Image: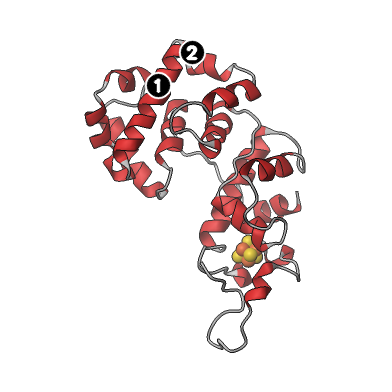
């Protein structure tokens, strides 16, 4: 909770996930795979303009047309297949009703979502948490990086282990998980970058332990390099 409190005090409410409807959250969770959020916004704007942001419309549209609408998000043919797989799953299991789907117990729904083509753990958990308010923590690359650099994990820990560790360390509340994940993303994007850790300006600097793996990379010979830089 100290991590949450420090980031929350410095960064304030994140108000994540930016979406107008629950279905839009799900579409965004699939489209954001391997791309920047700005590209997802462009794809979602196309879908909105084409009135494709409902499960029924997405079920009916031809895959080629769907792919062309989401082109800005990259890997658009694969992602069109994933979106189609999700809406078919929704139709087959819940008669197209997101409310019915999210009324399913968390563990059962998570297991089902993970069997849908293109839905891995991070996507499933984003759908559960941000779409359905189910208390599951979303682990992403920023979470792995920050925990690794702080010596809490080795930075390569399995998704499920990191998720369980966080879920068991803080109160199991969807609102808290929601805000915590968003704060981690913000901190990762702005300070804890892949190529360089900008620790001196980072809100989490007071919690960086003296034995952080970052210090392993401290190289006195590279005098123009920040001591917090590490290899990508
Ligand atoms: S930038 Fe430094 S202080 Fe901030 S989260 Fe990364 S390792 Fe920690």
Q: Is mark 1 within 8 Å of ligand 1?
A: no
Q: Is residue 123 above or below residue 150?
A: above
Q: Secondary structure at mark 2?
A: helix
In the rendering, which numbered label is found on residue 93? 2
**Residue under the image location 67 percent in, 74 percent down:** 216
Give residue 147's quadrant in the image.
Answer: bottom right
**Residue 138 locus on image (x, y percent):** 59, 40
Residue 117, percent across and down? Answer: 43, 29
| Label 2, label 1: how far apart the Cα atoms are | 10 Å
At 28% from the left edge and 25% from the top edge, which residue is drawn? 51
Q: Within 10 Å of the Cα at label 2, are there few (<14), some (14-19), or many (20+) other Cα atoms?
A: few
Please indicate whether residue 113 sits to the left or right of residue 32 in the image: right
Label 2 lies in ligand 1 vicinity (Cβ under 8 Å)? no
Q: Quadrant of ligand 1?
A: bottom right
* Closer to the camera in the image, 35 or 10: 35
Q: How many marks?
A: 2
The reply to whether residue 203 is in sight is no
- Towards the viewer: 57 or 119: 119
- The kind of secondary structure element at disc 1 is helix
Q: Is residue 64 visible?
A: yes
- Residue 194 in picture, x, y percent from top left: 52, 63
Q: Which residue is mark 1?
A: 87
Vertical side of 221 occupied by 107: above or below: above
Front-lying residue, 104 or 189: 104
């Amino acid at each position: 909770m100290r991590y949450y409190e420090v980031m929350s005090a410095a960064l304030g409410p994140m108000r994540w996930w930016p979406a107008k409807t629950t279905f839009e959250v799900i579409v965004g969770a699939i489209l954001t795979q391997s791309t920047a959020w700005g590209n997802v916004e462009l794809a979602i704007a196309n879908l909105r303009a084409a009135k494709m942001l409902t499960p029924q419309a997405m079920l009916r549209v031809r895959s080629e047309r769907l792919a062309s609408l989401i082109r800005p998000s990259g890997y658009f043919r694969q992602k069109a297949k994933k979106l189609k797989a999700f809406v078919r799953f929704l139709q087959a299991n819940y008669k197209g009703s997101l409310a019915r789907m999210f009324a399913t117990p968390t563990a059962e729904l998570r297991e089902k979502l993970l069997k849908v083509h293109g839905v891995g753990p991070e996507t499933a958990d984003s759908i559960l948490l941000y779409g359905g308010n189910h208390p599951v923590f979303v682990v992403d690359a920023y979470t792995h990086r920050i925990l690794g650099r702080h010596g809490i994990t080795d930075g390569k820990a399995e998704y499920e282990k990191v998720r369980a560790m966080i879920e068991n360390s803080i109160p199991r509340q969807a609102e808290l998980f929601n805000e915590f994940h968003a704060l981690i993303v913000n901190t990762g994007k702005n300070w804890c970058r892949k190529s360089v850790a900008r620790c001196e300006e980072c809100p989490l600097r007071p919690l960086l332990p003296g034995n952080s793996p970052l210090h392993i990379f401290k190289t006195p010979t590279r005098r123009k390099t920040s001591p917090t830089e590490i290899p990508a």
